[in-house]
Amino acid sequence: MLTIKQRRPAIRTLRGWAIQVLQEAGAIHECEEHAWAKDRADPHARERAFDLARQDPPPGLAPDEAVAEVCDVLDTIGDTCPECLPTEI
């Protein structure tokens, strides 16, 4: 029986690759209503994302450059959805 190793889907941009890595590691998730990416603020998930980026950078990118791109993308993602109404406290 032939077995095939599951591959990640082809990503067209470096930012798209970084978002996929962050999702795979559980560092970000989507707003259920609006589909905006939200930071989970989980330091262990962030470390998993950095480890994934180091271990499997996109072709032509050094591991340190891949980690820097993941970090840059993570810095642009907030912990709230910009379209959700703020909850009253």
Image: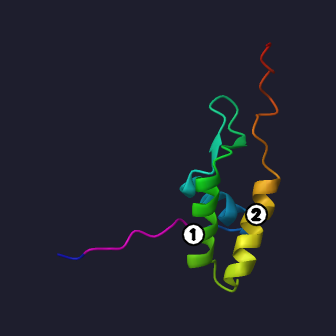
The residue drawn where x is 59% and y is 70% is 51
48 left or right of 63 in image: left
Identified at 82% across, 52% down, the residue is 76
Three-letter code for the amino acid on which mark 2 is drawn: Cys
Amino acid type, label 1 = Leu
- Determine whether, in the image, residue 15 is placed left or right of residue 24: right
Numbered mark located on residue 52 in the image: 1
What is the secondary structure assignment of the residue under circle 1?
helix
Which quadrant is the C terminus positioned in?
A: top right
Picture layout, residue 48 above or below residue 76:
below
Say whether residue 28 is magenta: no
Q: Is residue 6 left or right of residue 9?
A: left
Q: Is residue 7 left or right of residue 36?
A: left
First in sequence: mark 2 or mark 1?
1
Location of residue 10 in the rendering, given as x and y in whole percent from the top left corner: 58, 68
Asked if the stretch drawn in magenta spans residue 7, the answer is: yes
Alpha carbon separation for disc pair 2 and 1: 12 Å
The answer to whether residue 56 is visible is no
Give the labeled residue for mark 2.
71
What is the magenta segment's predominant secondary structure? loop
Identify the magenta region. 3-9
Q: Quadrant of the N terminus?
A: bottom left
As helix, strand or loop, the secondary structure at mark 2 comes to helix
Whole-percent x and y of residue 67? 71, 72
Colour convention: rainbow
- Residue 11 point in image, percent of width and height: 63, 67
Q: Tell me residue 45's x, y (percent).
A: 59, 54
